[in-house]
Image (cartoon, helix red, strand yellow):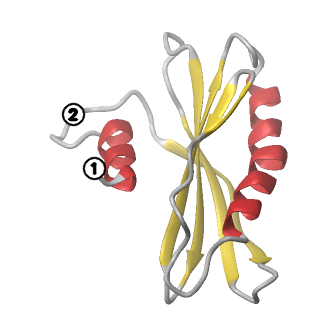
Amino acid sequence: MNIAFFTATWCYGSHGENMPSPVTEMLQDVPHTTKRGLAFDLSLSKKNLTAEHNYWLYFIVAHKADLGNQSFTLLATKQTFPDERLADLLASTIVIDEAKGRLEEADETGRPLRVPFLTEGWMLL
């Protein structure tokens, strides 16, 4: 199954269901150039979930006109990051840097699929 399709249908619904709330843009059009010279525009958004969810959900999209979108998904547990501001800080610093590191593997055909990056309390897909 295509991970981007799975993420889109799981987070946004595939049959017209109403999701709890919209997505909030946090960062938009942040330029990043890889060591190979590929230039991407990064954006970071957060899915506004209900209080019943035990995790925070973020999306990083690296856009390059001729490659399209390279998408990353962050799941951070509320057990480890009970304060939303702390989860936002994680997403906008450490996780953005991890996504930039993965883009270093990209070439003109895209980037390789990697095993999800797991650490204490958060996972980057």
The amino acid type, in three-letter code, at marker 2 is Glu
Circle 1 sits in a helix, a strand or a loop, which is it? loop
User: Which mark's residue is nearer the viewer, 1 or 2?
Assistant: 1
Horizontal and vertical percent for residue 47? 52, 38
Circle 2 sits in a helix, a strand or a loop, which is it? loop
**Residue on which disc 1 sits:** 1
Residue at position x 58%, y 21% in the image: 55
Identity of the residue furthest to the left in this view: 15
Horizontal and vertical percent for residue 107? 60, 82
Drawn side of residue 10 relative to residue 106, left or right = left
Nearer to the camera, 50 or 77: 77
Question: Mark number for residue 17?
Answer: 2
| Above or below: residue 109 compared with residue 104 | below
Could you give the CA–CA distance between mark 1 and mark 2, rounded to whole angstroms? 21 Å
Q: Are marks 1 and 2 in contact (CB under 8 Å)?
A: no
**Quadrant the C terminus occupies:** top right
The amino acid type, in three-letter code, at marker 1 is Met
Mark 2, Cα crowd under 10 Å, few <14 / some 14-19 / many 20+, is few
User: If you read the primary sequence from the N terminus, does the residue marked by circle 1 or circle 2 appear first?
Assistant: 1
Residue at position x 53%, y 66% in the image: 70
Drawn side of residue 65 relative to residue 87, left or right = left
Horizontal and vertical percent for residue 34? 77, 79
Residue at position x 82%, y 28% in the image: 86
Quadrant in the rendering for residue 97: bottom right
